[in-house]
Structures are given as C-alpha cells and as structure tokens.
C-alpha cells in the first residue's frame, strides 16, 4: 500500500523544518487545511491545493502525491529494469552504439506495431512488463532510424519518437521527471527527423504534462497553447489532426484549472467536446493507439476530473451520467473516471455509490487500483464515516488499508469494529 497523503505531508513538512503554520503561510492555504490533511480527517485535496502545498514545501507534485508508483520505492538503488530503461533512453557516453535487439534487421512497420502494443501495456498499468520490453524497442528503433534510405530512416525516426515519448510517460508514472524530460527531449529530436508534422505537437503535449507534474503550470500552458495553434492552422482537417489538437487543448485547460482558473478551463473543455463530435464524420487514423487520446468520452472524463478536483461533486456526477465510452478509450482513462466518480460520491456523503464505483474499478482494473494512492485515500475516508456500507471491508483488505493502525496513531488504542 502507498503512503497516505497525510503521512507524506507530515514527513515532507518536518524535513523542510516547517511548522503547520509556516507551511500554510508559504503555500497560501489555511492552517486548518494542513491540519485536517495531516490528521487524515481528509484523505484527498483539490489539485490547486496540492500544487500550492508542493510549492510551499519546495518539492515536485509527484513527491507529494507519490501517484502512482510503478515500482516499489525502498530507498535502495534503482531496480535493474529501470536502469535498463535509463540506458536505452540515454546511451552511455563515449561508447559504441548499441547493437540491435535482434540479429535480423527489424522493419519500421514491425517496430511500429510493437510500440503500439507497448502503449497498450502502459494504459493497462503493466509497468513491470513495459520496463522489460521498452529498452529493446528503443534500441531497435534507434538502429532503424540510422540505416537505409531517407524514407526508411524517416520511418525509423517516427517509431523512435513514439518509443521515447512512451519512455517519457513511463518515467512520469515512476516519479522520475528528470528521466521523463530527457526521454521527451530525445523524442523531439527524432520527431524532427521523421517528417511527421503531428509527432512534434504530440510530444509537446507529453512535455506539458511533465511540466504540470513539476508544478510549472505557466510553462505547461504556454507550450500546449502554442502547439495547439500550430496544429489548428495546418492539420485540423484530418482525424489525427483533430485528435492531436484536442489533446493539446485539454492539456491547456487542465493547466488553467490547476492554476485555479476553473471558468476558463471549463470553457476550453466545452470547445474541445464540441470539436470531438467532428471525429464521427472523419476516417479513423491507421492506428489510434499511436495518436493522442481524444474523443467525446475522453473530454467528458477530463471534465468530470476537473469538477471533482475543484470541489464540485454534484457537477461531476451530473457530467458522468450518460458517458458512452468509445472502444478506443484506454483502460487508464476508464480507471480515472471510476476513481473520480467514487470521490464525488464520497464528497456528497453517498457511501454506497462510492463503494459501487470502487468495486467496478476493482473488477475492470485491479492493477491500476493498487497503483493509485487516491483509491487508498478514498477507502480511508469511507472507513472514517459513521456508516460503512457493504463491500467496504473487502476493498480495504484488497488495498491493505488498516483502519485500526490509523486510529491507534491518533488515540493510542483501537477498539474492535463491528462488521458492516
């Protein structure tokens, strides 16, 4: 089980040698907010609050959230799988180029299919398997980008760009934003050699996400808006262009929302949702797994998330009703929707609805559920409520949530709890 947000906040505050009052002043939040989070009277907080706290602590948002850990963090050296990913993304200096992963020459077309499959693993949260496969894919793609005629090299560079973009996403999920930005910088260079005009803005969207995780919200907004403007001018007539443009617009909206400007973010999301309706009248991309995630359902999922994060649970639940998930909606997005619905139900006091959403999440994405610290926080919040609905105990056991331990930390004892 991941560390509770309250425990993380206490640990980081003490490391910074700050009192609750001093942290509240630095973060420009109320002392009551800091106190309730640390005492676990609240298991979660809005993203603007979390950004403010991370800024006050002088740490990246990922340090505060720990969300979601793809590999266990023990304080020891990095595991060999992660080291292999690092070596593939940033090859050793002053060393001969790595040999291809396979003896026979791999075609860019085959590599493209492998990269698409690897993205599917990412969206399923199969990070361990992905770390095993990605180094070989990157090595093969780097080789493919360096041999053959100009068209073959360009095709290899396109595959390399998508593989390194995936490396950036994986690194963000592992909390390694330094590695993420290194991988995305190299992905940008490969995109320049690919001749694919949409690859660079797709990678720019990933960079904006990395900036968001570092609380560089202004940088993230400017990058997403700039890239979106370029796509809108030249490529909005194709489904791939609409998807890339829409993804960037959603990214910019998210940055505005995390900066506290919910009204502007909501307006941009409405524009994106309207644009997504055009996709039903356009031919689909050759392989949608290699193009930005963007559809009516993805926009609505993101709108639900922003409403929840800005303490608008009723609005979030209203937006979530009637969502028709498209077939290409990745599992990770379905996961976020169920988590946000569970949180909205929790915030409105509907414990039965929250448990039902979490049970659905456990059925469709148990791996993702174990990775998300928000799931742990929600179950902890639900256990602290006066009435515990059926199914909550099983969820707590699945996530390893020990309510007695939490109570003992505050009271020094723990009485038996009756079955719900």
Image (tube, grey):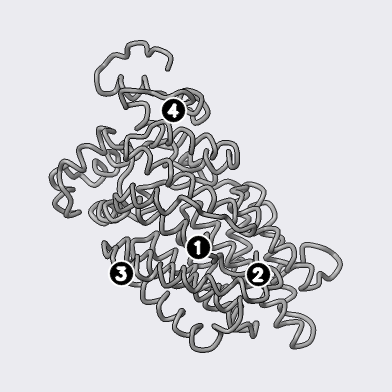
Q: Are marks 2 and 3 in contact (CB under 8 Å)?
A: no
Q: Give residue 292's mark.
A: none
Q: Nearer the viewer, mark 2 or mark 3?
A: 3
Closer-to-camera residue (24/73): 24
Task: Establish if 52 lies above or below 281.
Answer: above
Secondary structure of the residue carrying tag 2 is loop
Q: Which residue is mark 2?
A: 95
Q: Which residue is mark 3?
A: 264
Compare marks 2 and 4 and give the one earlier in the sequence. 2
Q: CA distance from mark 1 to mark 2?
A: 23 Å
Where is residue 358? Give x, y as percent.
Answer: 49, 37
Disc 4 marks which residue?
Answer: 401
> How many other residues sit within 10 Å of disc 1, few (<14), some (14-19) or many (≥20)?
many
First-in-chain label (3 vs 4) = 3
Q: Nearer the viewer, mark 1 or mark 2?
A: 1
Measuring 46% from the left and 50% from the top, which residue is drawn there? 321
Q: Nearer the viewer, residue 384 or 315?
A: 315
| Distance between the alpha carbons at the discs numbered 1 and 4 | 31 Å
Q: Position of residue 161 (x, y in %)?
A: 62, 73
């Amino acid at each position: 089980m991941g560390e509770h947000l309250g425990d993380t906040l206490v640990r980081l505050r003490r490391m910074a040698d700050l009192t609750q009052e001093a942290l509240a002043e630095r973060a420009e939040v109320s002392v009551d907010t800091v106190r309730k989070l640390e005492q676990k009277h609240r298991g979660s907080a809005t993203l603007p609050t979390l950004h403010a706290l991370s800024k006050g602590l002088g740490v990246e948002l990922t340090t505060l959230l720990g969300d979601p850990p793809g590999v266990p963090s023990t304080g020891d050296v990095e595991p060999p799988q992660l080291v292999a990913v690092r070596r593939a993304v940033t090859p050793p200096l002053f060393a001969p180029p790595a040999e291809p992963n396979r003896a026979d020459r791999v075609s860019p077309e085959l590599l493209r299919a492998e990269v698409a499959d690897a993205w599917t693993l990412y969206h399923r949260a199969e990070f361990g398997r992905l770390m095993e496969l990605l180094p070989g894919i990157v090595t093969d793609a780097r080789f493919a980008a360096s041999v053959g005629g100009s068209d073959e090299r360009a095709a290899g560079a396109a595959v390399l760009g998508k593989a390194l973009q995936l490396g950036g996403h994986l690194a963000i999920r592992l909390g390694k934003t330094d590695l993420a930005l290194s991988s995305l910088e190299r992905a940008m260079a490969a995109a320049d050699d690919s001749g694919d005009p949409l690859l660079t803005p797709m990678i720019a969207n990933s960079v904006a996400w990395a900036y968001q995780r570092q609380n560089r919200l202004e940088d993230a907004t400017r990058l997403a808006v700039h890239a979106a403007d370029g796509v809108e001018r030249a490529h909005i007539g194709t489904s791939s262009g609409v998807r890339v443009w829409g993804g960037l617009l959603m990214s910019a909206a998210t940055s505005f929302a995390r900066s506290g400007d919910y009204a502007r973010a909501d307006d941009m999301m409405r524009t994106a949702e309207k644009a997504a309706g055009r996709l039903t009248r356009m031919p689909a991309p050759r392989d949608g797994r290699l193009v930005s995630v963007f559809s009516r359902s993805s926009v609505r999922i993101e709108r639900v998330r922003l409403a929840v994060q800005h303490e608008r649970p009723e609005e979030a639940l209203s937006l979530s009703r009637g969502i028709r998930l498209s077939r290409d909606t990745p599992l990770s997005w379905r996961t976020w929707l169920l988590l946000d619905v569970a949180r909205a139900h929790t915030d409105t006091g509907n414990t039965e609805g929250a448990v039902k959403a979490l049970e659905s999440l456990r059925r469709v994405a148990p791996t993702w559920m174990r990775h998300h610290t928000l799931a742990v926080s929600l179950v902890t919040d639900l256990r602290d409520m006066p009435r515990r609905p059926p199914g909550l105990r099983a969820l707590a056991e699945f996530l390893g949530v020990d309510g007695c331990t939490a109570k003992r930390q505050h009271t020094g004892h723990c009485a038996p709890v009756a079955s719900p």
